[in-house]
Amino acid sequence: MCHLGYKLQISGLVQGVGFRPLVFELASELGLHGEVKNDGFGVEIILACTKEECENFIYKLKEKLPPLARIDSIDITEQTTTNYTHFSIGTSLQNAKTTPMLSDFALCKECKKEFFDEKNPRFLYPFITCTHCGPRFSIIKNLPYDRCNTTMEALKMCEFCKSEYEDPKNRRFHAQPISCPQCKIDVFLKNKKGEILAQDDEAFKTCAKLLKQGKILAIKGMGGFHLMCDAFNLEAIKELRLRKNRPKKPFALMCRDASDAKELCFVDEEEEKLLGSILAPIVILKAKKAFSLIAPDVDKLGIMLAYTPLHLLLFRYFDGVLVATSANLSGESIIKDEDNLLKKLGNVFDFYLDYAREIHNPSDDSIAQVINGKTMFLRTSRGLNPTYLEIKSDKKGVFLALGSELKNEFVIFYENKLLISPYIGDLKSIDVHERFFKLLEFFKQNYDLKFDAILCDKHPHFSYAKEFEERIKISHHYAHFCAAYFEYEENFAKDEKALAFICDGTGYGEDGKIWGGEVFVGNLKEYERIAHFENFTLINSDIKNIQNLALSLIFHYDLEDKAKDFLAKIPKIKL
């Protein structure tokens, strides 16, 4: 017998985020019959119900979305349905080409509560997680996102975890990184010879003691190792700067919680919300006093809160604040494995904390700042990228935008989606250059992509772009214009021209000269350069040295008399 019903095709971030358990729970609560399953484009829901019941279901679904889920579109089709007697989760119809690959996320509130609950089976377990939080991108080797395609494959699931994993009413239903003390991920504290000094809980206790003694530790986090030391031990910070050859660049800090962050910085409501969010980025905050060794010559600090249960367990035994800077050689990618850590940074740290789950894809901490109540991201990686944006477009094909040479991220357009890569780094480094192509190949293989066109910067000397034969070259500042226009395109009539001020650094211009400080009138098809900052000569062709930029302008405009106090601070041999 057939009944009237509805089919809902939902696209967005709806796989691997606890979406199907929510649908199951909500349909059961409302007494609706049917089924839900993953398909190659998102989630398909069949409901045997009236129009009013369907509308009520959708309203409540949007209202109760899991933390990591995002609905981009819902296509509703009225149809006849089979004689469903209950609601169930059906067999998934996976298509690796379209399954979104999510980033890694901070510990959720539910898991954090269980972590500190002495009666919970995962009390103080450093890898507690569920479908609402934890690692994703860092452990994925292949799509679809199943445990056998992640670095959890080598770790056998115990019966307790298996019961939760298979229970659609449990928030750990199909949580691929699930584990517990019965099938635990081992943690090791080692010396620079790779010898195990302590394991599991004892490893954390010993780490805390070593940090209090002023030692520098490499500690494996979600997407790679951090170099850590006691933020209030001045000698330890001096030693870290000396060993890492980082005399001036600010260090990020990790605090146990927001109250510790407030001891160091002024934190408003929006900043506190961002610090404790599922993204848990490094947040740039106004410092309450100068911290000359942590952040020389600036009045701000970059602070993140402990965002994994591993970090929370460390802070259970360490009372204080930690310097937490990426473990890497200057200009290179964050280190994700023990061999490279010992090879490249063996002379920087004293001991290291490792664990028995491989990081397949490294990722850096995201960085953000709240300006006038709005969050602005300065680096988009852990918690944010990779990400997917569905767009309405009649364009057919697969296109790759290579991104800039500095602070690189690439973007792929396919099937009306924009796939934005994580932060990769500065491609002048051979190590980062290799990471760029390795990550690009990773996405190409998993989504079976062949590019119809490659978009790149017009600069003739960017080596990474030369490895692609057919390229559409776009000038640096027009690319910025197009990005901003695209973001606000809904505010314009079709092909309407906009006035734009592009003040981002320098870039290769249409005339082969260095451009910077540009004023354009244009749209996504064409533009006219109507004004720009006056050209001046750079010292050593160096745009990074702020003092040299100031000198260039002083000499260009004959301002030596007005700038005599500034010039007096500069050694005469340099002048």
Image (cartoon, rainbow, N blue to C red):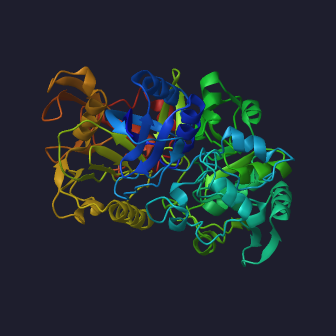
Q: Quadrant of residue 426?
A: bottom left
Q: Is residue 33 left or right of residue 323?
A: left
What residue is at 53 percent from the left and 45 percent from the top? 88
**Visible residue check, residue 504:** no
- Residue 87: percent from the left, percent from the top? 53, 41
Count of marks overlaid on the render: 0
**Which is more toward the observer, 353 or 412?**
412
Q: Which quadrant, please, contains the N terminus?
A: top left
Q: Is residue 104 left or right of residue 496?
A: right
**Visible residue check, residue 91:** yes
Q: Is residue 255 above or below residue 60?
A: below
- Residue 191: percent from the left, percent from the top? 76, 73
**Which is more toward the observer, 542 or 375?**
375
Q: Which residue of the protein is positioned furthest toward the front in this rendering?
A: 1
Q: Quadrant of residue 437?
A: bottom left
- Residue 190: percent from the left, percent from the top? 75, 71
- Residue 170: percent from the left, percent from the top? 65, 46
Q: Is residue 182 above or below residue 549?
A: below
Q: Quadrant of residue 242?
A: bottom right
What residue is at 36 percent from the left and 34 percent from the top? 73
What residue is at 53 percent from the left and 21 percent from the top? 373
What residue is at 32 percent from the left and 35 percent from the top? 79
**Which is more toward the observer, 296 or 214?**
214
